[in-house]
Amino acid sequence: MKKQQGLSVIAILLVLALVGAGLMLVFKIVPVYTEYGDVKNALTALSTETNVGEQTLRQEFDGKANVSGVTSVKGENLMVVAGAGSNYLRAKYQREVPLFGNVSLLFHFDTQAGQPPAQ
């Protein structure tokens, strides 16, 4: 009689559970980093605008964030220093992503664009 080879039903179920958990993490994490990229792009675009005030930059960020679907940070949460030639914008925020039950992931983001003000 030949010895059987391959995975047992239990081993297949364990592999499927691990693959499922990995996919769940990917589907929860990718949107967080996509949003971070949208925030970074908006800050970079706004840092090159000239002759605008802080309030205008905040409103324009809110408009860009609304179009991109950014919900974690608003214009009022930005650090904005408007200058004559360039602007400095910084977004420092956290995003919590629930996984299951009382288990969540917490992401800390800190991005900036433009020339920092002289201290």
Image: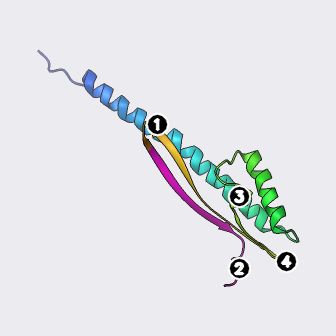
Which picture quadrant has residue 69? top right
Label 1 vs label 2, nearer the camera: 2
Residue 84: mark in rendering:
4
Mark 2 touching mark 4, by CB under 8 A?
no
Q: Label for residue 14?
A: none
Q: Residue 113 colored magenta?
A: yes
Mark nearer the N terminus (1 vs 4)? 1
Instruction: Pick whichever of labels 1 and 3 is earlier in the sequence.
Output: 1
Spatial separation of the CA atoms under disc 1 and disc 4: 48 Å
Q: Which mark is residue 41?
A: 3
Q: What range is drawn magenta here? A: 104-119
State how far apart marks 2 and 4 are (Cα): 12 Å
Q: Position of residue 22 (x, y in %)?
A: 42, 39
* Sequence order check, earlier mark of 3 and 4: 3
**Residue pointed to by mark 1:** 23
Q: Amino acid at mark 4?
A: Ala
Residue placed at 86% from the left, 68% from the top? 52
Q: Which mark is residue 117?
A: 2
Instruction: Kindly identify the residue that appears in the image at 24 percent across and 23 percent down.
Output: 8
Q: What is the spatial separation of the Cα atoms under label 3 and label 4, in whole angstroms?
A: 21 Å
Residue at 77% of width from left, 53% of height from top? Answer: 62
